[in-house]
Image (tube, rainbow, N blue to C red):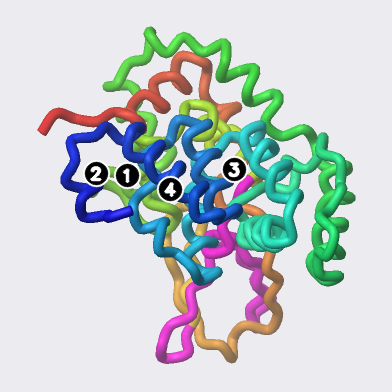
């Protein structure tokens, strides 16, 4: 398919994505076809772009898969995982998505662990441990999904949502140029579903990208700190706390370090917001101001 011609055609995002998906089917690109089909299923046609046709290296496909997975609520991630374990390449991709924090192990909770024949032992072993872990985890997503389904978004107040963003989010997140860049930037929130965005707020530990996992360190004066660690070129370490403030230390001052799989974001934000406030915050995060 001529991508230049495709870009020149007056097509909607969905029409373009459907053409690209058909082209992937013709090329027998099973893994890319699966991702494109899933993107369409969750109504994210914008993630199926002409560049996917020429993707051949594992890293490019992984980065694309992370974009697709990050747009999914837990129930949608479960559907994606069910499809991926059907092939050897899919098992490998699923393992990497879980390891990177793009997919939560909890999405495996209700899936039968039947791996594709020929799955490498190391990959199979990793996924088996994740399946076992999922059985011990609370059903993340179910309580959030119920609360989100009952929200009256028509009553949302954008003004209140802005105030709540400044109060609870701006210390660590940047949106439309406002706030700090400690955690992920939120400008992409406008294209996330209410379900996925709501889960990110109500259950921040369900999907934590490797780059934003917190660490616990002990200093030489027995002080214990929890935060996001960023190693600098000069050898020093910057520790960003939950308040968005950063402190810098030399490596020599750090006696112990333990990396976690959890987010620095407080897990009780949902408890601090009533339903109207939650609806207002979600509406503000997804609001696209007129230019």
Disc 3 to disc 2, C-alpha distance: 21 Å
Disc 4 to disc 1, C-alpha distance: 31 Å
Residue 62: x and y in percent read 54, 61
Q: Which residue is label 1 attached to?
A: 187
Q: Which residue is label 4 attached to?
A: 23
Asked if the residue at tag 2 contacts the one at tag 3, i.e. Cβ–Cβ closer than 8 Å, the answer is: no
User: What residue is drawn where x is 40% and y is 63%?
Assistant: 54
Q: Which mark is first along the chain, 2 or 3?
A: 2
Asked if the residue at tag 2 contacts the one at tag 1, i.e. Cβ–Cβ closer than 8 Å, the answer is: yes
Q: Quadrant of residue 280?
A: top left
Residue 278: x and y in percent read 47, 22
Q: Which mark is residue 204?
A: 3
- Mark 4 or 1: in front is 4
Residue 122: x and y in percent read 82, 71
Q: Which mark is first along the chain, 3 or 4?
A: 4
**Which residue ends up furthest to the front in the rendered image?**
26
- Mark 1 or 2: in front is 1
Which portion, as a residue range, is magenta?
207-236
Q: Which residue is label 2 attached to?
A: 176
């Amino acid at each position: 398919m001529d991508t230049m011609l495709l870009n020149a055609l007056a097509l909607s995002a969905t029409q373009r994505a459907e053409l690209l998906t058909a082209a992937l089917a013709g090329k027998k690109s099973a893994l890319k076809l699966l991702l494109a089909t899933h993107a369409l299923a969750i109504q994210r046609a914008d993630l199926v772009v002409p560049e996917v046709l020429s993707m051949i290296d594992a890293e490019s496909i992984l980065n694309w898969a992370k974009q697709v997975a990050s747009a999914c609520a837990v129930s949608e991630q479960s559907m994606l995982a069910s499809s991926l374990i059907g092939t050897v390449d899919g098992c490998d991709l699923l393992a990497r998505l879980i390891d990177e924090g793009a997919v939560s192990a909890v999405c495996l909770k209700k899936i039968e662990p039947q791996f594709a024949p020929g799955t490498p032992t190391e990959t199979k072993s990793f996924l088996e441990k994740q399946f076992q872990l999922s059985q011990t985890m609370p059903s993340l997503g179910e309580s959030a999904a119920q609360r989100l389904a009952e929200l009256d978004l028509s009553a949302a107040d954008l003004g209140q949502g802005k105030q709540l963003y400044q109060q609870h989010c701006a210390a660590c997140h940047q949106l439309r140029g406002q706030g700090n860049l400690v955690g992920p930037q939120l400008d992409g929130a406008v294209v996330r579903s209410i379900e996925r965005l709501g889960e990110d707020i109500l259950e921040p530990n369900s999907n934590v990208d490797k780059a934003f996992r917190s660490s616990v360190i002990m200093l030489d004066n027995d002080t214990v700190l929890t935060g996001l660690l960023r190693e600098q070129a000069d050898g020093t370490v910057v520790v960003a706390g939950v308040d968005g403030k950063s402190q810098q230390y030399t490596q020599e001052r750090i006696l112990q370090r333990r990396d976690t799989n959890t987010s620095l974001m407080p897990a009780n934000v949902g408890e601090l917001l009533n339903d109207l406030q939650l609806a207002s915050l979600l509406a503000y995060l997804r609001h696209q101001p007129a230019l």
